[in-house]
C-alpha cells in the first residue's frame, strides 16, 4: 500500500496545478485508488478533474503510470471526442503545451499529473423510470466505441496495456500468493488455476482481426459512466457519458462487453444492454462463451489485484471460495456463467 498523508497529497496537487493556466483554483480531495483525484474549481462554472498518477496499491504501478502511456490515454480520449463524436472528458494542456505534467514526490520519484474537464452527471440507478432506456443506450454507446476502434489507427509511439493471454496469465499467477497468505485453501487455489488455464484457452482461440481486437475502455462498469442532465433530443432519455479511461488498452471487444455485463448490471438488464449493442454492431450468440470467460477473468483479476490489500483480506477470504464454488465450477463444466453472476 502507498501511504500518503493529506498534507503531502495537497502539496503535490498544488505543485501540479501551478503548471496549468488557471487563476486561483481551489482543491477538493475526492479519493485515492488507481489515482489521487481532486475536483478543481476556478470560479464561475470552470470545474476540472485533477489526477495524480500514484496508485494506492503498489502492485498497480507499472507502464500505465509512464508519461507515454498517459499521453496515449489522452490521445485516445481526444480521438473519441474529435473524430468519434462521443461525449468524453477533454484533457487540458499545461502552459508548455504538454498533455502530462510532472511533480517531484518526497521520495525523489516523479509523479505524472493530468487535468481533465469535469463532466456533470448522475450515476445509474436501476430503479429509475428511464433505466431500461439508459441501459439500452449504454449498450449502443459501447458498440459505437468499438466500431470507432475498428477503423482507428493508433499514432506512432502509442503505448497502452495489452489485455491478451500474457496479461491474464501474469495476473492469475499472483493467486498463488493468496494461498501463501492464507486467504484461501490449496483446494480453492487448484480450482482457480484450472479456471485460469481454461480462460486462457478461450481467449487464445479468439481472432485478432480489427473486427474483434482494438482499443477498449477495459473498466466500463456501472460506476464508470454518467447519466447526462438533459436529453440531447426531446422525448429521449439523457445521454450516457463514459468516464475513467485509466485502464484503456488493446484487447478483445468481448472483454469490454464482459466488464459492462458483469460490472453491476443485474440479470434482467443484461438482455437490454445486448439489444442496444446489437443495434449498432453484430454480436453472435456463439461469442458468449468467450464473454463468460472474460467476465470470470475480470472477477479473478480483481481478487489478484487486491490480494496484498489488508483492508480487503476478510472480504477476500469470504468471497473467493463463493466464486469458486458457484462460478468457476460452472465454467469448468461448460455451463454459462453470466446468467448466474
Image: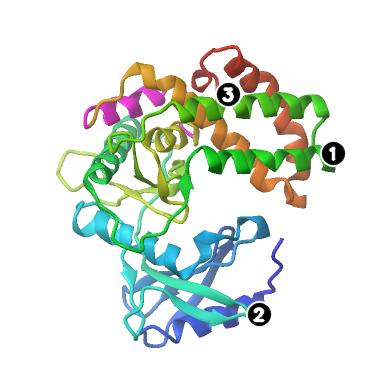
Q: SS for tag 3?
A: helix
Q: Which residues are magenta?
A: 264-280
Which residue lies at the image location 61% right of the left edge and 21% below the top edge? Answer: 327
The answer to whether any part of residue 282 appears in the image is: yes
* Marked residue nearer the N-terminal end (1 or 2): 2
How far is the residue under mark 1 from the one under mark 2?
35 Å
Horizontal and vertical percent position of residue 341: 55, 24
Neighbour tally class for label 1: few under 14, some 14-19, many 20 plus, Cα within 10 Å: few
* Quadrant of the drawing holding the N terminus: bottom right
Residue 46 vertical position relative to residue 318 in the rendered view, above or below:
below
Q: Which mark is residue 7?
A: 2
The answer to whether any part of residue 266 appears in the image is: no
How far is the residue under mark 2 from the one under mark 3?
47 Å
Neighbour tally class for label 2: few under 14, some 14-19, many 20 plus, Cα within 10 Å: few
* Marked residue nearer the N-terminal end (1 or 3): 1
Residue 159 vertical position relative to residue 236 in the rendered view, above or below:
below
What residue is disc 1 on?
182
Residue 255 vertical position relative to residue 116 in the rendered view, above or below:
above
Q: SS for tag 2?
A: helix
Give the quarter of the image for residue 95.
bottom left
Horizontal and vertical percent position of residue 87: 26, 54
**Residue 13 among those drawn in magenta:** no
* Marked residue nearer the N-terminal end (2 or 3): 2
**Residue 269 among those drawn in magenta:** yes
Horizontal and vertical percent position of residue 305: 65, 47
Q: Is residue 167 left or right of residue 1?
A: left
Q: Which mark is residue 157?
A: none
Horizontal and vertical percent position of residue 159: 41, 59
What residue is disc 3 on?
198
Which residue lies at the image location 51% right of the left edge and 26% below the top edge? Answer: 293
Which residue lies at the image location 53% right of the left edge and 67% below the top edge? Answer: 53
Amino acid at each position: 500500500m502507498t501511504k500518503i498523508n493529506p498534507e503531502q497529497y495537497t502539496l503535490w496537487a498544488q505543485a501540479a496545478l501551478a503548471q496549468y493556466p488557471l487563476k486561483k483554483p481551489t482543491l477538493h480531495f475526492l479519493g485515492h485508488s488507481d489515482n489521487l483525484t481532486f475536483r478543481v474549481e476556478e470560479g464561475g462554472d470552470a470545474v476540472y478533474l485533477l489526477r495524480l498518477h500514484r496508485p494506492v496499491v503498489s502492485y498497480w504501478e507499472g507502464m500505465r503510470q509512464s508519461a507515454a502511456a498517459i499521453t496515449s490515454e489522452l490521445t485516445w480520449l481526444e480521438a473519441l471526442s474529435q473524430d468519434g463524436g462521443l461525449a468524453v472528458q477533454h484533457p487540458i494542456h499545461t502552459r508548455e503545451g504538454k498533455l502530462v505534467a510532472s511533480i517531484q514526490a518526497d521520495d525523489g520519484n516523479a509523479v505524472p499529473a493530468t487535468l481533465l474537464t469535469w463532466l456533470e452527471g448522475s450515476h445509474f440507478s436501476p430503479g429509475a423510470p428511464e433505466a431500461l432506456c439508459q441501459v439500452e443506450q449504454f449498450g449502443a454507446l459501447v458498440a459505437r466505441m468499438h466500431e470507432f476502434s475498428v477503423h482507428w489507427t493508433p499514432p506512432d509511439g502509442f503505448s497502452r496495456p495489452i489485455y491478451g493471454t500474457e496479461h491474464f496469465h501474469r495476473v492469475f499467477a499472483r493467486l498463488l500468493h493468496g494461498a501463501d497468505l492464507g486467504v484461501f485453501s490449496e483446494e480453492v487455489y487448484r480450482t482457480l488455476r484450472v479456471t485460469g488455464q481454461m480462460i486462457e484457452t478461450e481467449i487464445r482461440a479468439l481472432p485478432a482481426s480489427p473486427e474483434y481486437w482494438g482499443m477498449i475502455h477495459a473498466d466500463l462498469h456501472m460506476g464508470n459512466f454518467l447519466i447526462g442532465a438533459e436529453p440531447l433530443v426531446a422525448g429521449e432519455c439523457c445521454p450516457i457519458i463514459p468516464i475513467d479511461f485509466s485502464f484503456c488498452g488493446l484487447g478483445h471487444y468481448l472483454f469490454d462487453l464482459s466488464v459492462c455485463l458483469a460490472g453491476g448490471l443485474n440479470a434482467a438488464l443484461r438482455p437490454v444492454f445486448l439489444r442496444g449493442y446489437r443495434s449498432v454492431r453484430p454480436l453472435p450468440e456463439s461469442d458468449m462463451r468467450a464473454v463468460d470467460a472474460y467476465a470470470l477473468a475480470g472477477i479473478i483479476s480483481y481478487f489478484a489485484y487486491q490480494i496484498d490489500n489488508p483492508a480487503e483480506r476478510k472480504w477476500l477470504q469470504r468471497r473467493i471460495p463463493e466464486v469458486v464454488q458457484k462460478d468457476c465450477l460452472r465454467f469448468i463444466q461448460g455451463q454459462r456463467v453470466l446468467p448466474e453472476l
